[in-house]
Image (spheres, rainbow, N blue to C red):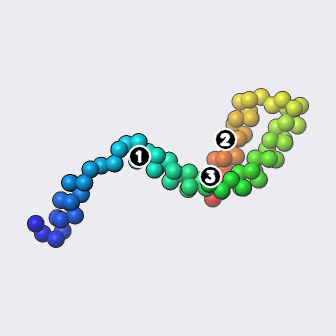
Amino acid sequence: MTGASQPLALAAKLPEAPLSYRLARRVAEYARLMRLDRPVGTWLLLWPALWALWIAGAGRPRPRVLLVFVLGVVVMRAAGC
């Protein structure tokens, strides 16, 4: 074996991590990329949106509209980072 083919031979012998582990790690990486571990920015965007929905909906906003706004806040906050 030459020096260049040794890592390839070693990689072929190593077992692959289980799918659940790989998916969990990828989700965790994306959560950190979206900065979900630091929720202050999300709260700063969410509170005014919730107040506006409660005022506009006379205290009872429609659940679908509420869900759209909450998801929009999380996505836009992540896009801003």
Q: Is 71 above or below relative to 65?
A: below
Q: CA distance from mark 1 to mark 2?
A: 26 Å
Report x, y in % for residue 32. Answer: 56, 55
The kind of residue on which mark 2 rests is Leu
Mark 1 touches mark 2? (CB < 8 Å): no
**In the drawing, does residue 54 fall left or right of residue 1?**
right
Q: What residue lies at 77% left-to-right and 53% top-to-bottom?
A: 44
**In the drawing, does residue 9 fall left or right of residue 76?**
left
Q: Which mark is residue 71?
A: 2
Report x, y in % for residue 16. Answer: 30, 49
Mark 1: which secondary structure?
helix
Q: Which residue is mark 1?
A: 21
Local crowd at mark 2 within 10 Å, few (<14), some, or many (≥20)?
A: few
Foreground pick, 31 / 73: 31
Q: CA distance from mark 2 to mark 3?
A: 13 Å
Q: Which residue is mark 3?
A: 36
Report x, y in % for residue 27. Answer: 50, 47
The kind of residue on which mark 3 rests is Leu
Q: What residue lies at 40% left-to-right and 47% top-to-bottom?
A: 22
In front: mark 2 or mark 3?
A: 3
Local crowd at mark 1 within 10 Å, few (<14), some, or many (≥20)?
A: few
Q: What residue lies at 18% left-to-right and 65% top-to-bottom?
A: 6
Sequence-first disc among 1 and 2:
1
Residue 79 in view: no
Local crowd at mark 3 within 10 Å, few (<14), some, or many (≥20)?
A: some
